[in-house]
Image (cartoon, rainbow, N blue to C red):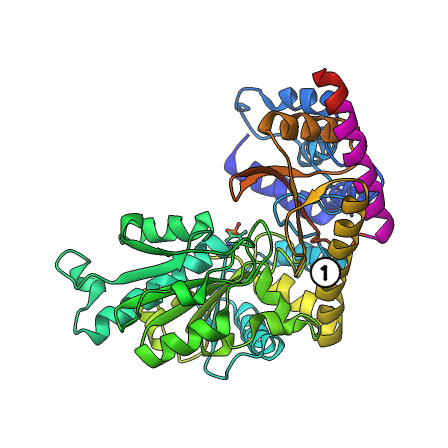
Amino acid sequence: MTARELRDRMRADLRSGAVFDTAHRQAAAYLDSAFDRNVSPSNHALAALASFDEPLPKGPGDAEAIIDRLATHGSPATNAQIGGRFFGLVNGGALPVAQAAGWLAGAWDQNVVLHAVSPLGAKLEEVCERWLRELLGLPEDTSAGFVTGSSMAIFCGLAAARWRLLSSLGWDVNARGLAGAAALRIVTGRETHSAVLKAIGLLGFGTDCIEYVEVDHQGRLIAEAMPALDARTIVILQAGNVNSGAFDPIDAVCREADAKGAWVHVDGAFGLWAAASNKLRHLTDGMASAHSFSLDAHKTLNVTYDCGIVLCRDQEAITAAMQASGAYLPRTGERDGMAMTPEMSRRARGIELWAALAYLGRDGVDMLVTELHERAVQAGREFASAGFDVLNDIVFNQVVLGFDDDAEVQRIIQEVRASGECWIGASRWQGRPVIRFSVCSWATTPDDISRAVRAIALARQQAFESAR
Ligand SMILES: *Cc1c(COP(=O)(O)O)cnc(C)c1O
């Protein structure tokens, strides 16, 4: 086949549309079944993944057959994350409107590097930035960068902090690096997320320099245990402990940091959305005076992957930290996506985010977030009546179940996965083996919660019997 024949074949694929019809038909069947089928893939489906272990094809194939094969062997081997009974990590489901917008975004294949390259992508990012400020109650000077997830958003916030604090000391970190620079201090709670540690490593601070602050029995940083702050300090707070969902005392710490000129970053990957709920907003009180924030639209907001957001109240710092420059890049004063993120070329994440926010509106976001909390409270109640040891105060969407040994937790998790009834994960928290149960999908009904609690109770009994 010649290059020209290949091009003609692809044009023909576009014209006939059969490959897209196949993808659409397969996806629609999947979406419909994902709520009722087993949550974990069956062993049979996992074994069938071996069909992908084949040599790289010699030449071009048939697009429709490839999509069909992908769906046939791929769909059954997914975890049904978009249904109502996936309680692992803090995954978040997917709003139908965001999924549909994602299909359109795929067709457009926009690159939001510069306004001139994707005026649509730039406009939607700009609108999302404004809507997010309003939803979360953040000041007018807050700007947003759209990245893969909170790991990268944390990295961006801390990079902005590093640039600003060193710049105030007369040191250009972009040009001179960290060797020879004044040492910055990093203060964070003992239960800070591993993504924070990763960012601290990537930024060259090194995790050894962290001044850890003691936490209470819920994993909240104890404000009274903070060391003295100064203008060389970056404080990293948590809005939503990844196990318990607990919030650090944001208000008290922000006040102290403000008085001393320290930079505060709030890691609110899933928890920052509490600010959009009338009932839960108090958890984030005082956060508007922090300097940078990281959160995920792909978690609590149920936007499709991947959609992380860095919010920063110091636009000069974040733009300088991202070192946005290059003579061939015509900067226009319009919104250029690359100025706010580490990437140059990047997909237009604002498309799905815009669709989600346009669909839900302020009240819809409030209902979504508040309902996740209500369902978690229900789960806590039902777990307790089934004799489980619920370790955390359910302030947001997380429920933590305590056990006596790791092997027991592993047996329960295996039984639950084999049952296909729901998906849960193991962790260790405050010295104990735990199961984390995270309510984070719009699709989760009260029945889903009761069904999951029953399945986990049964698995515990089976694990107990098999261990005897
Ligand atoms: C999920 C999470 C992260 C990491 O976010 P990614 O989107 O997975 O990169 C960081 N912090 C907290 C508190 C989280 O829950």
The image position of residue 81, as x and y in percent, is 70, 44
On whether ligand 1 comes within 8 Å of the CB at mark 1, the answer is no
The image position of residue 331, as x and y in percent, is 36, 74
Crowdedness near tag 1: few (<14), some (14–19) or many (≥20) residues, C-alpha within 10 Å: many
| Quadrant of the image containing the C terminus | top right
In the displayed orientation, state which residue is furthest to the top.
468
For the point 57% across and 53% down, which residue is it?
Answer: 306
Classify residue 253 as left or right of residue 232: right
Residue 146 magenta: no
Stretch in magenta: 445-462
User: Is residue 405 depicted above or below 156 in this figure?
Assistant: above
Q: Main secondary structure of the magenta part?
A: helix
For the point 77% across and 44% down, which residue is it?
Answer: 383
Residue 460 magenta: yes
For the point 73% across and 35% down, which residue is it?
Answer: 75
| Quadrant of the image containing the N terminus | top right
Residue corresponding to mark 1? 373
Along the viewing direction, whichever of 9 and 468 lies nearer the viewer? 468
Classify residue 87 as left or right of residue 204: right
User: Is residue 328 depicted above or below 129 in this figure?
Assistant: above
